Image (cartoon, helix red, strand yellow):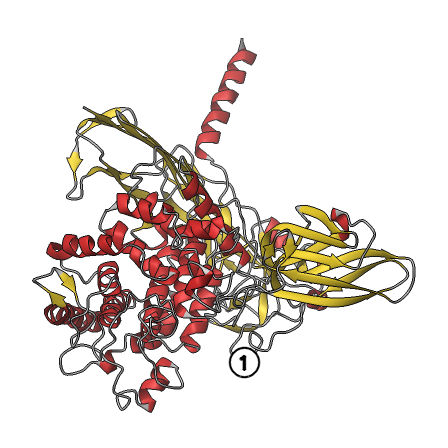
């Protein structure tokens, strides 16, 4: 009897321990870097641990060197019972593995800190030392009890440290093998890898005599079962002679440097990797022996990317295909460690970076590459006025998705200059047409050597036979430019508040409010209910309306008339401007029109790329719309962020996803199954819609709260939240406000009359 009692007591104790002593924190980040302890050799993962290497041996490896002497830490709080909120944390840092195993914290022991902060926690010990390996771990207490210690994560500092500097992962390589190999002529073999990537090639071939010459062609396009030797624009094709040696040997096929994309402004491939080119196909000519899949290896270069971090599947096959194209694009175009415009130039531009950044956030739990790009562009801006202004949007996105304010704090003065307030004229609008205003002092402040000029969209109507700007009329006082200026002022106001510049924040608020009044007074046509292209213009375009709506300057009373015009124009903008068009549409809660745009199948659509066999998004909707277009432009991948952010409706409302929205606009989609990565952990959303009900199941990360609004497709009889009846509160946009939820799993059901 006594033994039975002890057994029951032990079981109860174990049960209590399991519920209060939760699983350990996971997803450890240092300076926004996950897997900081992973080592690589020539881009391939090495099976060696940091603690096993001497200082000299690190020269033979690549790793994510931490460049801050006072880095930040982050982790994912274990879920426990649900509605989990962290109450305290303790971080320890050691400089040898033996101490780390004991969690001694001889370098730094934060002690127990009462705080719910689980991202961007600043190291507060003595400055870290360059070229040194450290080890850290964390344990936390939540409202459900104390966790175990996390795994120990090693990290190594860079050779030079600053109190704050951007850290980022090294570029790595993956081995790809052919999807199909086809003999298309007696001595010609055609090889398809299934998807394009930035890569070099390696062939293992047999030869019975010395000095046989074969030819190896690589490229992005195929035609009639052969590699396309004359592709459109800057779609890539290369053909190289290869002299074989007697016997069986392995031959590297490394693309030659291109003068344009290896120039002084281009981002170069690091020395430890081979030069790369975008390729999907390989054709081996004048070679008779059979080639097998193990004879051909494609060495693909990427920034480390987890393809399983995000997921989307619906009952609309077109939307699914668009999602897969755009998601893969973000991985494939990460090959340079900084967001570039495509293979033609390999130059970072703000417009590309903004779209790429949002897409990267929604397809992988990765933030360092976006920050690296943001800070690179602050020092190396590009010429379009609007893109100079986009620096503030990029910096704000960085803060909202990471909760880490350091980049804004370090670059506040540059960001302030990038509002372009110094270009303001007597009427209260900014203008770039007077070169005298663009003084040497102005150029130094924005870090640009030359005059900036307005762009609106690209290519411009006058530059190519098929322009993308809806015949926009450029004038001195440009509607699109001043809409971006307004957004920049609004964001700088919030940055000023966050960095303790309270008086400056008040001045910026007054400036933005004045600009809004002037903008709407001078540029809005009250009779037509739409915006003109400029003060001196009577022309109305899609662009002069989509950008003000997307950037928040339209008065609420005018939103519907502006949207009515936008719906009348269709998709007469570029793939770049489509990011802002889709944001404008969904911000106006017109999910039906948004889904129509995402799934349309004419030549101006994402599906047009799919139909042509694209595996990476194009620079333009079709070859006919740009005569030198790339087939590897991530700015064409906007649905990779629009689908999670707008269709599924997951957007941060507080920095670092402490509080976020789940506002799906699923329109006619009957089924959605989505997984969205965040810095706090993954969010899953599953939706099932019928004529009689709308059901949404969500799972949200610990240490977060979410605001839920469901779309309403009929007269609601009942709202059930986790099986219990709730009060039906209808929003102004015909949604059902379900209030705020804690973390964990929840079910929302609308029952229609």
Q: Is residue 193 above or below residue 452?
A: above
- Viewer-nearest residue: 146 or 5: 146
- Residue 615, position as x, y percentages in the image: 53, 52
The residue under label 1 is 264
- Residue 335, position as x, y percentages in the image: 56, 62
The answer to whether residue 116 of the structure is visible from this angle is no
- Viewer-nearest residue: 381 or 16: 381
- Residue 397, position as x, y percentages in the image: 35, 60
Residue 581 is left or right of residue 11, and the answer is: left
| Occupied quadrant, residue 701 | top left
- Viewer-nearest residue: 72 or 667: 667
The answer to whether residue 279 of the structure is visible from this angle is yes
Specify few, some or many for label 1: CA neighbours under 10 Å numbering under 14, 14-19, or 20 or more: few
Q: Is residue 63 above or below residue 4?
A: below
Residue found at the very far top of the displayed protein: 1
User: At x 23% / y 74%, what residue is drawn?
Assistant: 478
Q: Which corner quadrant holds the C terminus?
A: top left
Residue found at the very far left of the displayed protein: 527
- At mark 1, the secondary structure is loop
Tag count: 1
- Viewer-nearest residue: 187 or 50: 187
- Residue 376, position as x, y percentages in the image: 46, 72
Residue 742 is left or right of residue 31, and the answer is: left
| Occupied quadrant, residue 666 | top left
């Amino acid at each position: 009897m006594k033994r039975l009692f002890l057994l029951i007591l032990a079981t109860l104790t174990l049960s209590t321990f399991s519920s209060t002593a939760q699983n350990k924190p996971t997803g450890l980040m240092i300076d926004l870097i996950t897997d900081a302890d992973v080592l690589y050799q020539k881009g391939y993962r090495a099976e060696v641990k940091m603690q096993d290497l001497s200082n000299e041996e690190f020269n033979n490896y690549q790793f994510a060197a931490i460049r801050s002497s006072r880095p930040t830490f982050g982790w994912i709080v274990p879920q426990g019972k649900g509605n989990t909120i962290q109450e305290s944390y303790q971080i320890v840092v050691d400089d040898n593995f033996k101490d780390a195993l004991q969690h001694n914290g001889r370098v730094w022991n934060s002690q127990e800190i009462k705080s719910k902060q689980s991202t961007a926690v600043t190291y507060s010990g003595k400055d870290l030392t360059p070229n040194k390996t450290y080890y850290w771990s964390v344990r936390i207490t939540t409202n459900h009890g104390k966790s175990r210690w996390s795994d120990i994560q090693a990290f190594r500092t860079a050779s030079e440290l600053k109190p704050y500097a951007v850290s980022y992962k090294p570029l790595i390589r993956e081995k790809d093998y052919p999807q199909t190999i086809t003999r298309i002529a007696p001595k010609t073999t055609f090889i398809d890898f299934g998807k394009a990537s930035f890569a070099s090639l390696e062939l293992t071939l047999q030869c019975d005599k010395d000095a046989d010459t074969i030819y190896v062609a690589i490229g992005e396009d195929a035609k009639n079962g052969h590699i396309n030797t004359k592709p459109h624009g800057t779609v890539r094709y290369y053909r190289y002679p290869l002299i074989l040696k007697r016997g069986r040997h392995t031959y590297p096929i490394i693309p030659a440097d291109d003068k344009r994309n290896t120039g002084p402004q281009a981002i170069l491939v690091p020395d430890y990797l081979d030069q790369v080119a975008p390729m999907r196909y390989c054709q081996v000519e004048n070679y008779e022996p059979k080639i097998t899949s193990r004879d051909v290896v494609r060495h693909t270069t990427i920034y480390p990317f987890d393809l399983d971090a995000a997921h989307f599947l619906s009952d609309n096959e077109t939307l699914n295909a668009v999602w897969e194209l755009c998601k893969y694009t973000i991985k494939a175009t990460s090959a340079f460690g900084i967001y570039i415009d495509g293979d033609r130039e390999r130059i970072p531009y703000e417009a590309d970076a903004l779209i790429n950044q949002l897409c990267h956030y929604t397809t992988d739990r990765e933030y360092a590459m976006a920050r690296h790009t943001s800070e690179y562009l602050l020092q190396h801006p590009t010429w379009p006025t609007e893109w100079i202004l986009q620096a503030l949007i990029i910096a704000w996105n960085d803060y909202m998705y990471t909760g880490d304010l350091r980049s804004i704090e370090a670059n506040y003065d540059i960001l302030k200059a990038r509002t372009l307030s110094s270009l303001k004229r007597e009427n209260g609008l900014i203008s770039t047409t007077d070169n005298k205003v663009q003084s040497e002092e102005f150029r130094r402040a924005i870090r640009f050597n030359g005059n900036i000029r307005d762009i609106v969209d690209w290519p411009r109507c006058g530059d190519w036979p098929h322009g993308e700007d809806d015949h926009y009329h450029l004038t001195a006082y440009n509607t699109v430019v001043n809409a971006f200026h307004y957004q920049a002022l609004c964001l700088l106001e919030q940055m000023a508040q966050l960095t303790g510049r309270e008086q400056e924040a008040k001045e910026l608020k007054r400036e933005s409010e004045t600009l809004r009044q002037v903008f709407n007074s001078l540029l809005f046509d009250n009779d037509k209910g739409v915006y003109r292209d400029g003060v001196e213009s009577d022309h109305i375009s899609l662009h002069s309306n989509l950008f003000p709506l997307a950037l928040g300057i339209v008065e609420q009373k005018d939103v519907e008339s502006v949207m009515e015009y936008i719906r009348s124009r269709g998709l007469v903008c570029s793939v770049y401007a489509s990011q802002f068009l889709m944001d404008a549409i969904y911000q106006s809660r017109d999910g039906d029109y948004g889904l129509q745009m995402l799934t349309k199948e004419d030549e101006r659509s994402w599906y047009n790329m799919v139909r042509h066999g694209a595996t990476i998004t194009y620079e333009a909707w079709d070859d006919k719309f740009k005569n030198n277009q790339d087939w590897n432009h991530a700015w064409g991948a906007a649905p990779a962020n629009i689908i999670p952010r707008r269709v599924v409706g997951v957007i941060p409302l507080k920095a670092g996803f402490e509080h976020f929205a789940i506002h799906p606009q699923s329109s006619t989609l009957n089924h959605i199954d989505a997984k969205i990565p965040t810095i706090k952990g993954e969010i899953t959303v599953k939706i099932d819609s019928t004529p009689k009900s709308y059901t949404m199941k969500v799972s949200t990360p610990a240490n977060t709260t979410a605001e839920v609004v469901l779309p309403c497709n009929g007269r609601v009889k009942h709202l059930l939240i986790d099986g219990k009846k709730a009060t039906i509160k209808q929003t102004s946009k015909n949604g059902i406000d379900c209030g705020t939820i804690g973390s964990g799993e929840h079910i929302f059901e609308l029952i229609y009359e």
